[in-house]
C-alpha cells in the first residue's frame, strides 16, 4: 500500500460514534513538531497547536518548505531533528533563515 493506492484510506476514520478526546496527551516525553510554511495539507497553526498539547512539545516552522520540511536542500531541518533526538532540544535554529526560496516558474501552457 502507498500513495498510489488511495483505497487504503476509504474507511478512515471508521465512525464509532465516539468523539475525540480533548484531554492533553498523558506523556512528558519531548515531542518535536515540524511544519513547512508552504504546506498545503497541514497549516503551521495546526503544528503549533499540536506542539502545545504536549508538556514538552517544541514546534519548528521551516520557511520555503512544504509538507516534508526535512527534505529542504540545506540539511538545516535534518540537523534540528538530529539535535532534538540527541539532546531533547532544538538547538540553534538560525540556519532556518538560510533555507533558499522556492523557485517559481512562470505559467505553463497547456499541451494541445
Image: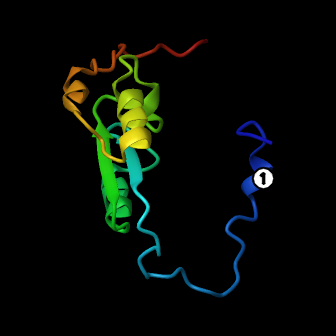
Task: Name the residue nearer the viewer: 6 or 29.
Answer: 29
In the image, is 86 to the left or to the right of 44?
Answer: right
| Closer to the camera in the image, 80 or 19 | 80
Relative height, residue 101 to residue 58 (above, below) = above
Q: Is residue 28 left or right of residue 1?
A: left
x then y, percent, for residue 8: 78, 52
Q: Which residue lies furthest to the front in this view?
A: 87
Q: Which of 21 and 110 is in front in this view?
A: 21
Q: Where is residue 87 in the image (x, y as percent from the top left)?
A: 36, 42
Q: Which residue is pictured at 56% across the width and 84% down the height?
A: 19
Label 1 Cα crowd, 10 Å radius (few <14 / some 14-19 / many 20+): few
* Count of numbered circles in the view: 1
Q: Residue at horizontal 36%, vertical 58%?
A: 46
Q: Which residue corresponds to the image point at 27% horizontal and 20% vertical from the top-left?
A: 101
Image quadrant where residue 91 sits: top left
Residue sitting nearer the eye, 84 or 72: 84
Which quadrant holds the N terminus?
top right
Type of colouring: rainbow
Q: Mark 1 points at which residue?
A: 8
Can you say whether 74 is above or below 86 in the image?
Answer: above
Q: In this view, does 39 lie above or below 21?
A: above
Give x and y (percent) for residue 54: 37, 66
**Horizontal and vertical percent position of residue 81:** 41, 36
Residue 18: quarter of image: bottom right
Question: Is 68 placed above or below 73 here?
Answer: below
| Quadrant showing the C terminus | top right
102 vs 5, left or right, is left
Element type where label 1 sits in the image: helix
Residue depicted at x 36% and y 47%: 88
Amino acid at each position: 500500500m502507498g500513495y498510489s493506492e488511495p483505497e487504503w484510506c476509504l474507511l478512515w476514520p471508521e465512525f464509532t460514534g465516539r468523539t475525540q478526546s480533548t484531554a492533553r496527551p498523558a506523556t512528558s516525553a519531548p515531542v518535536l513538531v515540524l511544519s513547512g510554511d508552504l504546506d498545503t495539507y497541514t497549516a503551521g497553526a495546526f503544528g503549533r497547536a499540536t506542539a502545545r498539547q504536549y508538556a514538552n512539545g517544541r514546534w519548528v516552522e521551516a520557511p520555503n518548505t512544504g509538507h516534508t520540511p526535512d527534505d529542504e536542500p540545506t540539511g538545516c531541518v535534518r540537523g534540528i531533528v538530529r539535535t532534538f533526538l540527541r539532546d531533547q532540544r532544538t538547538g540553534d535554529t538560525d540556519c532556518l533563515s538560510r533555507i533558499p526560496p522556492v523557485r517559481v516558474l512562470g505559467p505553463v501552457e497547456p499541451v494541445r
